[in-house]
Image: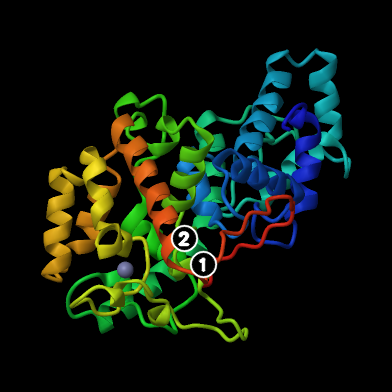
Amino acid sequence: MGFGCEIWGPGAFLDATIGKNTICDNKFEDVHNLFMRRTLCVGRSTSIAAMRHALNRTPVFAVWIPRILNFWNRLLRRGGNNFLAQSLHSQLQEPGSWGNQVLHLIKEVPGGYTLPIDTHGRPTTIEQATIKAIVESLVERESEKDRVLVQNLIIRANEAHTRGSLVRACPDDARLGFTRFKWQQWLMGPRPDHKAPAQHKHTFAANAHSFFHVRTLSNFMCANSWLNCSTGRTSHDGTAVPRSARICTLCPRFQRMTQDPEDEMHIFVCPLYEPLKGSYPRVFSSRAYRQFYIAHESKLSEVDDLFRTFLTQGGPEFWSQLAEFLIACRNARLTFQDDFRTNRGDLDDFSDTDDEAV
Ligand SMILES: [Zn+2]
């Protein structure tokens, strides 16, 4: 997709970003998002931030801008007498030309960077540190909005929190950014980074190979599951269901069980799935699971951290057994629950909505 972006990239960047204050609302990013959704086999409402993290991706312009600016440097390295370098010099004052667009691009970056022109109006080399800083400031601006949303949610959750999970303490009306908050608190593991093998081998994206495992783990680990927390947002008559009312309808069939929200954490403690656990020793005989289970039963405040530690411990055997367990749970639930609604399956849509509201 980025073939030749050194040449057409500056124009595309300006067309896509002027007046928008974001580098992610454009057709290139839509195609990139579709690629990530297809790779992970996840539904349309999956958080883009979670997908990027799972695949260690950045917005496309964060990759293209260094290529554009390094191309500028390559032209200058040819020397002042070279035709291409002279052509670049003459373009600087000409609106719409490549060189002028690159200057315009640098002006658009938040933070204000000095233009690569000397006192005689000649183009100068752009330092690698500057290129890195330009990209970082653009990516930083993208994540700032989410960070503020999550921070507000954490404050609201802390106000209501007495014991147990902070995610579950979050009030029903604190909706915007909740999926991201939950994902950060419960599901976010290390990024798959092949340059850091120790970290890389622990991620599900580096270990899941069969289609069924990839689809199951991606949807679950990106907080886009088939559980009521995600699929029960509206009732049959179309009214919105508050988060705390999206409960597990199967628990009351078991003695002494009270109603519990059906979310990613519940599936590991719901009595319905208890008989399945013996088949997945790598998941349920682990120390991390026992620690999480005790914290959950005693409603300790550390339960969120222990749940994340348990769920992101990683390793090939862990991920394959976790995927098998989740598939078995879904089948068991289908058998028990008549009104089970299937997961959204349609992926054939290029348009993206940053669906963070829950
Ligand atoms: Zn249950």
Q: Residue 180 location in percent, x, y?
A: 44, 62
Identify the amino acid type marked 2.
Leu
Task: Name the image quarter holding the N terminus.
Answer: top right
Q: Give me the C-alpha separation between circle 1 and circle 2.
A: 6 Å
Point 55% across, 56% down: residue: 46
- Element at label 2: helix
Which of disc 2 and disc 1 is earlier in sequence? 2
Q: Is residue 17 visible?
A: yes
The picture quadrant for ligand 1 comes to: bottom left
Cβ atoms under marks 1 and 2 closer than 8 Å: yes
Label 1 Cα crowd, 10 Å radius (few <14 / some 14-19 / many 20+):
some
Residue 340 is tagged as 1
Identify the amino acid type marked 1.
Phe
Q: Residue 326 location in percent, x, y?
A: 38, 49
Q: Nearer the viewer, residue 189 or 272?
A: 272
Point 49% across, 33% down: residue: 129
Q: Nearer the viewer, residue 178 or 138?
A: 178
Point 39% across, 64% down: residue: 181
Left or right, 139 with respect to 12, comes to left
Label 2 Cα crowd, 10 Å radius (few <14 / some 14-19 / many 20+):
some
Left or right, 22 with respect to 215, comes to right
Point 53% across, 57% down: residue: 47
Residue 334 is tagged as 2
- Element at label 1: loop
Mark 2 and ligand 1: say if the CB distance to the nearest ligand atom is below 8 Å. no
Q: Nearer the viewer, residue 139 or 259?
A: 259
Q: Is residue 56 visible?
A: no
